[in-house]
């Protein structure tokens, strides 16, 4: 075990040398390895309980998907391995698409920073998704969608829409534009997944809102039939209350609805001195709490009697884990291995009620 850390460092010498800037990081890694060797038993105990322990990947992946299903009654057959089901039992799409009454409402999950194929994290995600009968649709640039098989989901566009952006907006949104993917869900719902680059100014936060309005505008991409509902899901990476307020104000000016309401914390973390960014004083031993994750809908709930365009309505939204209710919870945690909470939006099609 003592040689383990040194062997890893030895294999990474080329990485340290390649950047020409990692001398300090290399020295810090040496110091961490020496400290670990001198307190090996404590290091092992901490490592085994850590959310980063690779042996816990499968359990963490399953935990991250669980909130998608916990509020709806599930057919117990869905939680049984196929070989354990009674002879002649078949799970079909109608079972998956039934809300309540022994089924579960269909789900669509927009994933950012999805683990690359061939990695242990991706294998754990695939196993957890399969156990829930979810399909994975890769969308490039670390984006992906997980969805119930009862949903007809097709990839419409990888990369955002920029033709109508001003030059000034485009300059601060290049990374965000690249990290955008859009899917069609059936014939009357379009969902965008956007992993934004951190806005560092009020102008950048307002530009992000304008970009969201453009993505949500069906005339901007003409990707779906007229009248479809458009829903945008994003980790905005807004780092402060000031920038979140500027973003929300611009969204309001553009008649877009944000869920959950502004000020709902969706991330809370405190990086230790061991996390690898020790030179950044703003990221070391500093409590960071922010509302970064949003669902965005064009228009407001009262725009039309039938809800938003297309007849879909957002019944409600929730955040899991609820950081507002758990004031002492820091992420990632042994019970939730992501540094962000999940934002869930429950949609209802008026025509089917």
Image (spheres, helix red, strand yellow):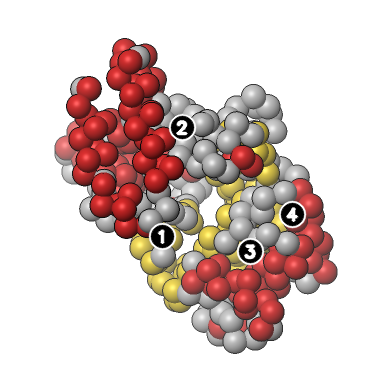
Residue at image mark 4: 244
For label 2, the SS is: loop
Q: In this view, does 150 lie above or below 1?
A: below
Q: Is residue 98 above or below residue 227?
A: above
Q: Mark 3 or mark 2, which is nearer the start of the sequence?
A: 2
Q: In front here: 301 or 171?
A: 171
* Tag 1–tag 4 contact (CB < 8 Å): no
Which marked residue is nearer to the observer: mark 3 or mark 1? Answer: 1
Residue at image mark 2: 274
Q: Mark 2 or mark 4, which is nearer the start of the sequence?
A: 4
Residue 105 drawn at (x, y percent):
49, 49
How far apart marks 4 and 2 lie (CA) works out to 29 Å
Instruction: Say if residue 188 shows up in the picture.
Output: no
Residue at image mark 3: 312
Residue 144 drawn at (x, y percent):
41, 60
How far apart marks 1 and 4 lie (CA) works out to 24 Å
How far apart marks 3 and 1 lie (CA) works out to 28 Å
For label 4, the SS is: helix
For label 3, the SS is: strand
* Tag 2–tag 3 contact (CB < 8 Å): no
**Identity of the residue drawn at 38% across and 56% down:** 20
Left or right, 250 with respect to 99, comes to right
């Amino acid at each position: 075990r003592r040689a383990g850390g040194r062997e890893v460092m030895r294999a990474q010498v080329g990485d340290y040398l390649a950047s020409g800037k990692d001398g300090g990081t290399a020295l810090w890694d040496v110091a961490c390895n020496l400290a670990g060797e001198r307190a090996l038993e404590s290091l092992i105990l901490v490592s085994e309980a850590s959310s980063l322990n690779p042996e816990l990947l499968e359990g963490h992946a399953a935990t991250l998907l669980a909130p998608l299903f916990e509020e709806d009654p599930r057919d117990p057959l869905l939680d049984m391995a196929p070989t354990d089901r009674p002879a002649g039992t078949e799970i079909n799409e109608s079972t998956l698409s039934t809300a309540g009454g022994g089924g579960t409402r269909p789900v669509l999950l927009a994933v950012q920073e999805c683990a690359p194929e061939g990695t242990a994290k991706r294998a754990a995600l695939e196993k957890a998704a399969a156990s829930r009968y979810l399909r994975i649709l890769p969308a490039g640039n670390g984006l992906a969608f997980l969805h119930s098989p009862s949903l007809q989901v097709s990839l419409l566009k990888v990369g955002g829409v920029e033709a109508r952006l001003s030059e000034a907006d485009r300059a601060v949104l290049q990374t965000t534009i690249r990290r955008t993917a859009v899917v069609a869900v059936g014939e009357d719902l379009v969902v965008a997944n956007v992993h934004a680059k951190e806005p560092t100014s009020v102008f950048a936060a307002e530009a992000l809102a304008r970009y969201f309005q453009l993505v949500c505008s069906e005339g901007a991409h003409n990707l779906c039939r007229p009248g479809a509902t458009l829903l945008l899901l994003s980790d905005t990476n807004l780092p402060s209350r000031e920038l979140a307020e500027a973003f929300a104000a611009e969204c309001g000016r553009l008649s877009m609805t944000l869920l959950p309401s502004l000020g709902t914390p969706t991330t809370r973390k405190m990086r230790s001195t061991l996390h690898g960014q020790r030179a950044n004083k703003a990221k070391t031993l500093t409590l960071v709490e922010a509302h970064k994750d949003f669902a965005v809908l064009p228009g407001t709930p009262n725009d039309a009697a039938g809800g938003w365009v297309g007849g879909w309505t957002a019944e409600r939204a929730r955040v899991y884990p609820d950081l507002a209710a758990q004031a002492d919870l820091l992420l990632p945690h042994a019970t939730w291995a992501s540094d962000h909470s999940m934002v869930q939006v429950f949609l209802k099609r008026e025509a089917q009620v």
